[in-house]
Image (tube, rainbow, N blue to C red):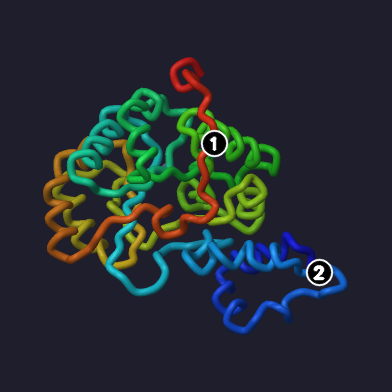
Amino acid sequence: MERRRFLLFLAAGLAGAAVGRGTAGLVDPEQAPLTPAAAAEPAAPAVLAPAPPTGVVDALPGDGTSLALTIDDGTDSEVVAAFCRFAQDAGVRLTFFPNGSYRSWEENGELLQPLIDSGQVAMGNHTWSHPDVTTLGDDQVAEEIGRNRDWLAQTFGVRTPFFRPPFGSHDERTDRIAADAGHPTIVLWNGTFGDSRPVSGEELVAAAQRWFAAQSIVVGHANQPAVTTVYDQLLALISERGLRTVTLADVWPVGLSRVQRVPGSARTA
Ligand SMILES: [Zn+2]
């Protein structure tokens, strides 16, 4: 097994088992001699925290009281602003999956960047313009994902392992293209605000009551103002149920890295 595959093997969540049993049997010493450095390198972070998994996730791993609120799209700049203020005021941890084609994210760059820099907000890739990627050819899928990845790096200085396919529509082919573009973890969800159609605040709270649960990944959208009217109720529910919000990068921090932001790119692109 070549070294890169060996690292991926460890990163795939098998590190604990591999470390426990010793790694000698996992590699062919003729093909890939394990230097002490090579042996130590993958094991150290893997023991401290699980690497972002390769493949599909729709819930948080293990037992706990974590709740991952993941907010997509960003068609409404006011709603993106309100989510940022919500995070700022209430200390809620959020993961955004923006489409770079919506100007709302750059328009709220001054609110958003400090939250990203502190780690309170994590980012994932949701494609540049929100197509159903299963309907596109390989090159178009790669372009949609790659353009948004580069926009995230240039605008906010982040590189992310997380990809959420628009509409949750994906297959093995699109998963592979996402992985090749640097996003091995395909993030779906097991709870929802139900706000991919027009909803009232009341309906959103009802959805939250149904879906806010330990180790859940809940999807919502920064598209309609209704959610901005029920933040207090959402906070009360989180508190009543003894949950704590986490970003996906809190759960799977390895592989999330910062890149040099291009100064001013957010405002001029
Ligand atoms: Zn979406």
Amino acid at the residue labelled 2: Pro
Q: Position of residue 166 (x, y in %)?
A: 48, 45
Residue that numbered label 2 is attached to? 33
Residue that numbered label 1 is attached to? 259
Taking the image as shown, residue 91 lies to the left or right of residue 26, namely left
Q: Badges 2 and 1: C-beta atoms under 8 Å apart? A: no
Taking the image as shown, residue 191 lies to the left or right of residue 100, namely left
Please report the residue visible at 43 percent of the width from the left and 43 percent of the height from the top. 123
Task: Indicate which label's residue lies in the foreground, 2 or 1.
Answer: 2
Is disc 2 placed on a helix, strand or loop?
loop
The image quarter in which residue 260 lies: top right
Please report the residue visible at 30 percent of the width from the left and 60 percent of the height from the top. 67
Q: Is residue 99 visible?
A: yes
Q: Residue furthest front?
A: 36
The image quarter in which residue 116 lies: top left
In front of the other: 13 or 73: 13
Amino acid at the residue labelled 1: Val
Please report the residue visible at 55 percent of the width from the left and 70 percent of the height from the top. 13
Query: Looking at the image, is mark 2 or mark 1 earlier in the sequence?
Result: 2
Q: Position of residue 29 (x, y in %)?
A: 82, 74
Q: Is mark 2 within 8 Å of ligand 1?
A: no
Tell how many labels: 2
Is disc 1 placed on a helix, strand or loop?
loop
**Mark 2 neighbour density, 10 Å: few (under 14) some (14–19) many (20 or more):** some
Please report the residue visible at 59 percent of the width from the left and 68 percent of the height from the top. 43
Query: Which quarter of the rendered picture does the N terminus lie within?
Result: bottom right
Query: Where residue 77 is drawn, which disc sits there?
Result: none
